[in-house]
Amino acid sequence: MGSVFDFVRFLATGTTGFTSAGLGSAEAEVRGAAAAAGLAVTRAELDPGAGAFGIFAGGVEFLFDDDQLTCVQFEVDRTGPLDLAGTRVGEDTTLEEFTRALDRVGIGWSVGVSSGGEPVVETTGSVRCHFTAEAPHRYVTAIATVGTPAVG
């Protein structure tokens, strides 16, 4: 399946590269960019009382709070395999394979552990890439959020 978004740029910068709309953008900006890219957009209400909703475009999830983009997520279950400069990143990609690919493209990274015990690779673009807790630690998702502290 793959994604129309630039996964390498996302990992390096935390932006999708398909639009100038970044974290903090309004829903209309993201919808407009998705439409310009020819992507179908689906909206899901997450917590209507709190103004939380999600938009799905090209397999990528854009989460909003009070009409401000707060999170972008590349979850392999929705995007299918992603391209990391010639390395296929999918549900079978290990932590070691992923970090070697980051090294090849010159994206800095560090490894921490989430509160649930899963290894998390944080890139210099402030994108957190989550892996399964059990070895050999397979790729699950890459997330960029507003105001979330780094893992330790």
Image (cartoon, grey):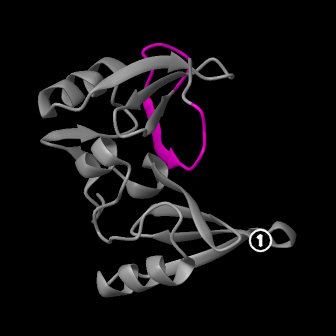
Q: Is residue 93 left or right of residue 129?
A: left
Q: Is residue 46 left or right of residue 102?
A: right
Query: Is 73 drawn above or below residue 123 in the view shown?
Result: below
In the rendered image, the residue lying farthest to the right is 49
Q: Quadrant of residue 51?
A: bottom right
Q: Secondary structure at mark 1?
A: loop
Q: Nearer the viewer, residue 118 or 106?
A: 106
Q: Amino acid at mark 1?
A: Gly
Residue name at image x 46 percent, y 76 percent: 30
Residue name at image x 43 percent, y 63 percent: 22
Residue 123 part of the magenta-drawn span = no
Q: Which residues are magenta?
A: 132-149
How busy is the neighbourhood of tag 1: few (under 14 within 10 Å), some, or many (20 plus)?
Answer: few
Q: Nearer the viewer, residue 78 or 70?
A: 70
Q: Quadrant of residue 15?
A: bottom left
Could you say where residue 46 lies in the image, as x and y percent from the top left? 75, 65
